[in-house]
Amino acid sequence: MTQHLPLAAAAPTATTAATTTAQEASHQGLTVGLFVALVAVTLVITLWARRSTRGTGGFYTGGGQFSALQNGIAISGDYLSAASFLGIAGIIALSGYDGFLYSIGFLVAWLVALLMVAELLRNTGRFTMADVLAARLRSGPMRTAAGVSTIVVSIFYLIAQMVGAATIVGQLLDVKGASAQIWTIVGVGALMIVYVVVGGMKGTTWVQIVKAGLLIAGAAVMTVWVLAKYGFDLGHLLGDAASASKKGEAFLRPGLKYGATDGWSKLDLVSLGVALVLGTAALPHVLVRFYTVPTGRDARKSVNWAIGIIGVFYLMTLVLGFGAAALVGTATIKAKDPSGNTAATLLAEHLGGGAGTTGGSLMLAFIAAVAFATILAVVAGLTLTSSSSFAHDLYASVIRKGRATERQELVTAKVAAVVIGAVAAALSIVARDLNVAFLVALAFAIAASANLPAILLTLFWRRFTTFGAKCGIYAGLVASIGLVLLSPICWGGASSTVPAVKLTAAQAKDCGVDAGDQRVGNATALISCTAAAPVPLQNPGVLSIPIGFAAAVLGSLAGGRRRRDEDADGRGFAELEVRALTGVGR
């Protein structure tokens, strides 16, 4: 009899294991099914839009026929990226109060776009940012500089979205390792190329509208669910989050990420804020949306709608981030992904009932599918913007000097979309371990350093010249990218989101860490090391933005009449001013 006891005990164990495996396979099938359905819907929208896309105007701006409400929803869909949903929720879950500063910066930034850029830009240009500069300054140099800047900023932003996609798919399908991330990035790159080449701006806009609706709905469901668990008592939620983080009250006060006693950390915080607030009004994929409505007034109304939608969403990220810290736990989030990008999806799984449950799998699949839709919509917009700039500004206006046919320009735009998508995918593979919100903040800093000085000074300064614009754009680009290359992100430390595995033995020694330390080579261990990099700032905005503005001003004032342009006497500025305010002559 006793010989049968082990068999009796083992039988239910084997049955349970088989049942669990079957459940996991069923849940994974559900997840894959939702993903496939989502991609199928977006492809149908793209194919539908293709039927009514005609000429360069249809491809670049959708014919400028979207209403203010439609464009406002599309702007929010374009702007609320993987950084907004995944990155910010993750940073709040890991860093508490300091992480919420990202949300504040992203929202406040729209005031600059509303008050100083949206309507004036719509009245002045046709397809791209370079149209505004070329309306007053010399066309060739301006289109070259603006085209280069647009492509660089778009690629940095694309990197963040593709890294986010790799994180989502890896968690959902429970696949680990570099190869899974790489193939996910390649797949996203292929999809975004299809959206752009087939659907143009009209298809991209409708994908963004659908995605914005899904994102707001998904975030709202999770927000209400989390608050309901705490009796809609926000104070109780914050208290539990602080306790679960093991940081106590420090989790709810400034200084956890940007150290209260560290001068460089404080400056990094200022740099982040400046980059976010000033960068929005200079992001190429945001600027091009102002051309998709009939009038400048509609462009301004679009921004009003976008501010309302975006504001509500960022308030929800506060609950999502602290909810993830309280219910999932910072340790669990870090164990899954040291940079925190999985906080929102882990929270969704927890709310549905936890890992292995049908409800948990449903919530995880739905929220992850929404996040994936977010990424697809944003990368399509970015790729369209950068490829349009190459075709319209560089190819048609500079290389062909206006002699290209409309068909040649369209073909060039589609080929450029393929090339830019491939380059962005390759760079994303290298940067796949970084937090996506941080990567987007870098794109904002580059845009604010290179694009914003040229845009604002063209619109508002009578003495601005072509030489000054070139100096501002190129100096801003070089300064921002150069400071990033000299920052701790590229030198292996100084960020609580950088895995220790990034440190070489020599770098670890410079940080005061023994090369044999067990944290070196441990992908989940984190090492703070501000001394390793020549420039101990993670975000270059506080240095590169003033450099961009100073170079633009000094370039315009330097060189005397020999280097000044015909518009320097004010005639070109007066014409642009009338055009920007009224739309006459556009």
Image (tube, helix red, strand yellow):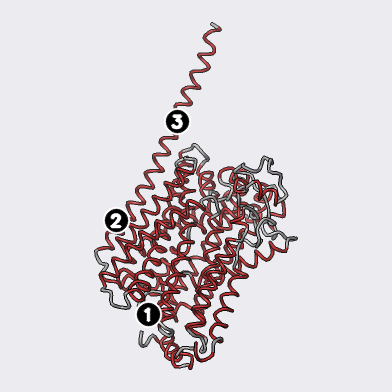
Extreme residue toward the top, this view = 1
Residue type at the position of mark 2 = Val
In the image, taking residue 97 as reference, residue 169 lies left or right, namely: left
Near-viewer residue (213 or 205): 205
Residue occupied by mark 1: 295
Near-viewer residue (531 or 537): 531
Residue type at the position of mark 1 = Thr
Give the percent coordinates (x, y) of residue 474.
Answer: 51, 73
On residue 44, which mark appears?
2
On residue 21, which mark appears?
3
In the image, taking residue 544 as reference, residue 389 lies left or right, namely: left
Q: SS for tag 1?
A: loop
Give the percent coordinates (x, y) of residue 126.
Answer: 36, 78
Give the percent coordinates (x, y) of residue 585.
Answer: 35, 87
**Residue drawn at (56%, 46%) of the image:** 337
Mark 1 and mark 2: Cα distance apart in space: 29 Å
